Amino acid sequence: MIKYKEVMKLTQEIVSVKCDLCGKEYSTGQDFFEIEEFHHISFCGGYASIFGDGTKVECDICQHCMHKFIGDSCRSYG
């Protein structure tokens, strides 16, 4: 027999996402597809990194800013 106990858990849901480059904020109610196209960058700087050894780096970039910065440099397939 499996016994259970009641556990109350706190959950979080996204309300909006703000681009770290242009500053535009997108809400989940109106801009669902824009939020799906956000690019979430997260990495840790390695040895001799210009960001700093072991530094955690994060940013959220909208698809429009991403296209402005890498659009001419990237390859598209499909």
Image (cartoon, rainbow, N blue to C red):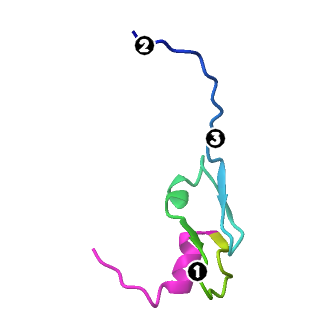
Around disc 2, counting alpha carbons within 10 Å, would you say few (fewer than 14), some (14 to 19), or many (20 or more)? few
Label 2: state its secondary structure. loop
Question: Farthest residue toward the top?
Answer: 1
Write the start and end of the magenta stretch as one range.
59-78
Sooner in the amino-acid sequence: mark 3 or mark 1 = 3
* Three-letter residue code for mark 3: Gln
Seen in the picture, residue 22 relative to 26 is either above or below; the reply is below
Q: Quadrant of the N terminus?
A: top left
Q: Which residue is mark 1?
A: 46
Residue in the foreground of this view, choosing between 6 and 65? 6
* Circle 2: residue type: Ile
Q: Decide: is 2 above or below 78.
A: above
Dot 2 corresponds to which residue?
Answer: 2
- What residue does disc 3 label? 12
- Circles 1 and 2 in contact, beta carbons < 8 Å: no
Q: Position of residue 78 (x, y in %)?
A: 27, 74
- Category of crowding for the residue at label 1, using alpha-carbon neighbours closer than 10 angstroms: few (below 14), some (14–19), many (at least 20): few
Residue 35 in the image, given as x and y percentages of width and height: 55, 58
Comparing labels 2 and 3, the label whose residue is closer to the camera: 2
**Gap between marks 3 and 1, in whole Å?**
31 Å
**Disc 1 from disc 2: Cα separation:** 47 Å
